[in-house]
C-alpha cells in the first residue's frame, strides 16, 4: 500500500488533492497530421557514429502454445504523463477511445485524488475532477456506469469505497463516498463480471485479507470465499465466470512474491490454486484481450520484469507471449478497443510517467514460441552495420546468425579498403546472396549468402569518379529481375543501370549536374527503389523531391515533399508512398503523388526519438521498421499507436558486442522461402 516492502506509517506521505497528470506529447498528436519539418540535415548520411544492443532474454517457461494464441505486440508510447504516477486506478473512459486515471502515488510519496481522462492513442489529457479522498494502492472497476474505488490509503490502509461518475470528454466531477469495506484493505484488485464487482487480495496494513468480496452496489458486500494463498499486489483478470489472481506478495510466513495462480469460480464459489507462474511476481498487471488473459511486468523482488505471459486455463500453462520495452511493476491497466494501456507504474521502485500498450498480434508470433513478440517473427533480419564495417543477419530471437566479413571462415573482401562503409544491403537471388553498396568505398558488391564469396563487384575501392566503372557515393544498389543492377550514384547526381558485365546501359540525370530539373537532371539522389512495373522511385535530397522514372529516363511524376531530407522512398499502394526523413528528430511519412502528407511519425524526445533514420519500411507484421542511424539501433514503430514496439541495439551507444550496432544504415527482411517481402520485384 505504501512503498513496496514498507508498512504504513513509515515516513511522511504528502497528500496531493489534484495531480497534474497532463500528458507531454512527445510525438505527433495524431496519425494524419504532419509536424513542421526541422532544419535540413547537412551532408549525405554523414556525421558521427553510434551503436545499440537488443532486448534482454526473457528467460521463463516456453511451453507449447495452444493453437491460435497470439503473441503480444507491446510498445512504449511517444508521449508520457506530465508527472510520474504509480499504484493508481485506470478504467476505460466514458467517451470511446479514452482511459480514466484516478488517484495514485507520485514522486516524493505524494498521494493524489486527481482524475484525468486520457485520449488514446493520441495521449491528449483532460482534467476531470477528483475523488472524494486521495488514495493509492486502491482497487477499481466499473459497475453500473460509474467507477468504484475500493480502499487504498495514504498513511495507512482504509476501508472507504468511493464512487466516481464516468465523465464525457471535457466534463469534470467529484467523487463521493458510497460505502465501507468490511475492514481496511489496500493493495487489492477488482474486476466486474456482469452486474457484480469482486475485490481480490490485499491487506489491512498488517495482515493479508484472504476474503474475496462481491458487491452489486459498492455498499453491501458478500464473501465469496478465501484465497488459499493470501496475497497483496496480485494481478487479477476475469475470463467468463472465472477470476484469476496471478502471483502477489505473501505478508506472513514465507513472506515475498509467490508463483501461485489462484482461480475463483464465481458461480460455485470454489477457489483453488490452478497453476504457477514461471517466476514469483508481485505488482504485475493482468488483462483479458481477445479471450486470452495476459500478465505483464511485475516485480520479482530484486528487479522488475519485462516479460508478458499468456495464460492457458485449460492446461494451466503460462506461456511467454512477448516483452515490454520498459520493464515495470505496479502499473494500472485499462482496455480500450482491443488494446490494453499500461499507465505509469514503477521502474526500480521509482514511479514512471511512461505509458505502454499491449495488443494481440498473431503476426508477432504465437505465445510459447521463442521470441514471441518479434515484429519479424519467422523471418531473418539483415543489417548493414555501417559504422562497424560489417553485415549482420539476425534470427527472430535477436541472435546474430551470420556476419560478414568473418575471417578465417570467409575469404577476405577484394580491394585495398576491404569491406568498408556498407550503406545498404539487400537479399537477392532467392536469399542466396546479398547486394551491398559501400558508399564511401565507392563500390557495389554481391556476396554469396552464407558462403561470403564475392560474386560480383563494380567500382574502384576508395577511388571516386564518374568515368565508366567508377562511382561517387553509391547509394541503394538493387539487383533487378533482368539481372541488371541499379544504383543511385549520389555525388555524381545520376541513377545508373549496370549490366552483369559491368557496362552502363542507361542513366537518369546528367553527370555532375546536381539540380532538380526532370527529366534531364537529378538533385542528389539517395534512393532508386524498383517498382513492380519496372520503373524506379527516386528521392532527391536537394530540394526534397520524390520522382518516378522509367528505366529509359522518362519522367512519370514528381513532387516536392514538405520535409527536410527524404530518404529511400517505398511504394505502399497505387497512390500511397512512404519514406524516412533523415533529420534529428527524424521522421517517417506517408504521402501521395500530389505531395500531401497523409501520416507522420516524429517523436521530438525520449527513447522514441529517431536520429537521422535513412530507411523505413512497412513489415508484413504491420509495423514500420527503421534503421535509426545515429541512435545506433534498429527500431520498429506501430503506425496506429505510434508506439516503439521493438529495438535492437543500445540507444546512443556504439559497439560491436552482441546486441550492439554502430550507425546501422540499411536493412532487409528474408522469408523462410527465400522471398523478400519489402521488395518482391527485385532479382
Image (cartoon, rainbow, N blue to C red):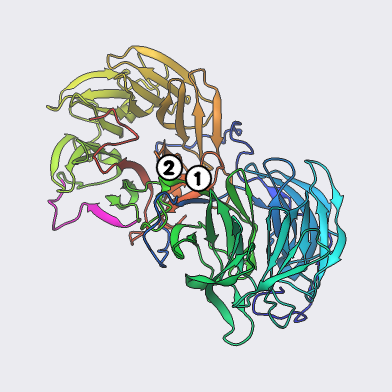
In the displayed orientation, state which residue is furthest to the front: 268
> Which image quarter holds the N terminus?
bottom right
Quadrant for the C terminus in the image: top left
Give the residue drawn at x 30%, y 21%.
511
Q: Which mark is residue 626?
A: 2
Is residue 621 placed above or below 541 in the rendered structure?
A: below
Name above or below for residue 40 compared with residue 136. Answer: above
Residues tagged 1 and 2 counted as in contact (Cβ below 8 A): yes
Check disc 1 and report the residue beneath it: 610
**Which element type, helix, strand or loop, lies under badge 1?**
loop
- Pick the residue in front: 344 or 454: 344
> How far apart are labels 1 and 2 at the CA level?
9 Å
Indicate the quadrant where residue 160 lies. bottom right
Q: Is residue 628 visible?
A: no
Q: Residue 426 carries which label?
A: none
Disc with the residue nearer the chain's start (1 vs 2): 1
Q: Residue at x 85, y 56 (%)?
A: 175
From this viewpoint, is residue 177 visible? Answer: yes
Does residue 149 show up magenta in the picture? no
Looking at the picture, how far across and down is residue 478, in whole percent? 27, 31
Give residue 552's position: percent from left, percent from top.
27, 14
Q: Give the range drawn in magenta.
A: 398-413
User: Whole-percent x and y of residue 118?
Assistant: 71, 47
Q: What element carries label 2?
A: strand
Disc 2: CA contacts within 10 A as few (<14), some (14-19) or many (>=20) = many
Amino acid at each position: 500500500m505504501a512503498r513496496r516492502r514498507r508498512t504504513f506509517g513509515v515516513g511522511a506521505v504528502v497528500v496531493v488533492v489534484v495531480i497534474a497528470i497532463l500528458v507531454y506529447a512527445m510525438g505527433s498528436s495524431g496519425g494524419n497530421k504532419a509536424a513542421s519539418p526541422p532544419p535540413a540535415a547537412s551532408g549525405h548520411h554523414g556525421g558521427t557514429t553510434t551503436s545499440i544492443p537488443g532486448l534482454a532474454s526473457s528467460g521463463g517457461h516456453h511451453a507449447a502454445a495452444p493453437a491460435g494464441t497470439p503473441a503480444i505486440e507491446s510498445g512504449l508510447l511517444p508521449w508520457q504523463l506530465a508527472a510520474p504516477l504509480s499504484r493508481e486506478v485506470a478504467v476505460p473512459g466514458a467517451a470511446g477511445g479514452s482511459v480514466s486515471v484516478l488517484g495514485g502515488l507520485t514522486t516524493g510519496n505524494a498521494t493524489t485524488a486527481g482524475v484525468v481522462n486520457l485520449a488514446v492513442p493520441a495521449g491528449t489529457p483532460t482534467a476531470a475532477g477528483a475523488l472524494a479522498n486521495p488514495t493509492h494502492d486502491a482497487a477499481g472497476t466499473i459497475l453500473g456506469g460509474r467507477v468504484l474505488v475500493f480502499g487504498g490509503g495514504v498513511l495507512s490502509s482504509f476501508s472507504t469505497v468511493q464512487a466516481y461518475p464516468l465523465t464525457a470528454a471535457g466534463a469534470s466531477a467529484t467523487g463521493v463516498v458510497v460505502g465501507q469495506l468490511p475492514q481496511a484493505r489496500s493493495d487489492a484488485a477488482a474486476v466486474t463480471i456482469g452486474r457484480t464487482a469482486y475485490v481480490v487480495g490485499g491487506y489491512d496494513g498488517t495482515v493479508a485479507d484472504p476474503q474475496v468480496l462481491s458487491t452489486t452496489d459498492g455498499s453491501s458486500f458478500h464473501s465469496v470465499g478465501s484465497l488459499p494463498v493470501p496475497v497483496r499486489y496480485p494481478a487479477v483478470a476475469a475470463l467468463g465466470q472465472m477470476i484469476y489472481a496471478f502471483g502477489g506478495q505473501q505478508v506472513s510466513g514465507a513472506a515475498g512474491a509467490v508463483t501461485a495462480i489462484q482461480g475463483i469460480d464465481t458461480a460455485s464459489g470454489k477457489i483453488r490454486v490452478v497453476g504457477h507462474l514461471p517466476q514469483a511476481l508481485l505488482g504485475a498487471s493482468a488483462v483479458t484481450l481477445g479471450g486470452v488473459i495476459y500478465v505483464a511486468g511485475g516485480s520479482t523482488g530484486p528487479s522488475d520484469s519485462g516479460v508478458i505471459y499468456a495464460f492457458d486455463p485449460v492446461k494451466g500453462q503460462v506461456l511467454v507471449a512477448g516483452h515490454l520495452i520498459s520493464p515495470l511493476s505496479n502499473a494500472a491497466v485499462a482496455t480500450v478497443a482491443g488494446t490494453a494501456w499500461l499507465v505509469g507504474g514503477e521502474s526500480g521502485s521509482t514511479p514512471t510517467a511512461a505509458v505502454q500498450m499491449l495488443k494481440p498480434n498473431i503476426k508477432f508470433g504465437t505465445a510459447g514460441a521463442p521470441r514471441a513478440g518479434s515484429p519479424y517473427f519467422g523471418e531473418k533480419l539483415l543489417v548493414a552495420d555501417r559504422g562497424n564495417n560489417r553485415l549482420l543477419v539476425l534470427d527472430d530471437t535477436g541472435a546474430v546468425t551470420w556476419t560478414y566479413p568473418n575471417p578465417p571462415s570467409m575469404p577476405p573482401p577484394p580491394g585495398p579498403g576491404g569491406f568498408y562503409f556498407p550503406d545498404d544491403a539487400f537479399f537477392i537471388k532467392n536469399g542466396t546472396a546479398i547486394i551491398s553498396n559501400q558508399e564511401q568505398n565507392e563500390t557495389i558488391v554481391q556476396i554469396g549468402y552464407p558462403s561470403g564469396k564475392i560474386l560480383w563487384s563494380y567500382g574502384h575501392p576508395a577511388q571516386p569518379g564518374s568515368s565508366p566503372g567508377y562511382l561517387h557515393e553509391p547509394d541503394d544498389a538493387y539487383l533487378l529481375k533482368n539481372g541488371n543492377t541499379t544504383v543511385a550514384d549520389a555525388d555524381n547526381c545520376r541513377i545508373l543501370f549496370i549490366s552483369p558485365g559491368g557496362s552502363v546501359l542507361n542513366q537518369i540525370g546528367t553527370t555532375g549536374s546536381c539540380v532538380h530539373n526532370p527529366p534531364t537532371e537529378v538533385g542528389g539522389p539517395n534512393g532508386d527503389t524498383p517498382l513492380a512495373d519496372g520503373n524506379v522511385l527516386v528521392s532527391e535530397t536537394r530540394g526534397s523531391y520524390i520522382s518516378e522514372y522509367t528505366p529509359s529516363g522518362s519522367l512519370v511524376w514528381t513532387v516536392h515533399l514538405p520535409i527536410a531530407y527524404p530518404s529511400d522512398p517505398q511504394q505502399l499502394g497505387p497512390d500511397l508512398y512512404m519514406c524516412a526523413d533523415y533529420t534529428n528528430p527524424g521522421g517517417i511519412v506517408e504521402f501521395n503523388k500530389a505531395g500531401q502528407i497523409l501520416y507522420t511519425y516524429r517523436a521530438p524526445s525520449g527513447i522514441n526519438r529517431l536520429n537521422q533514420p535513412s530507411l523505413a519500411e512497412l513489415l508484413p507484421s504491420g509495423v514500420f521498421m527503421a534503421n535509426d542511424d545515429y541512435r545506433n539501433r534498429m527500431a520498429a514503430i506501430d503506425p496506429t499507436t505510434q508506439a516503439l514496439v521493438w529495438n535492437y541495439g543500445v540507444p546512443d551507444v556504439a559497439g560491436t558486442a552482441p546486441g550492439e550496432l554502430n550507425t546501422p544504415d540499411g536493412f532487409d527482411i528474408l522469408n523462410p522461402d527465400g522471398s523478400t517481402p519489402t521488395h518482391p520485384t527485385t532479382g
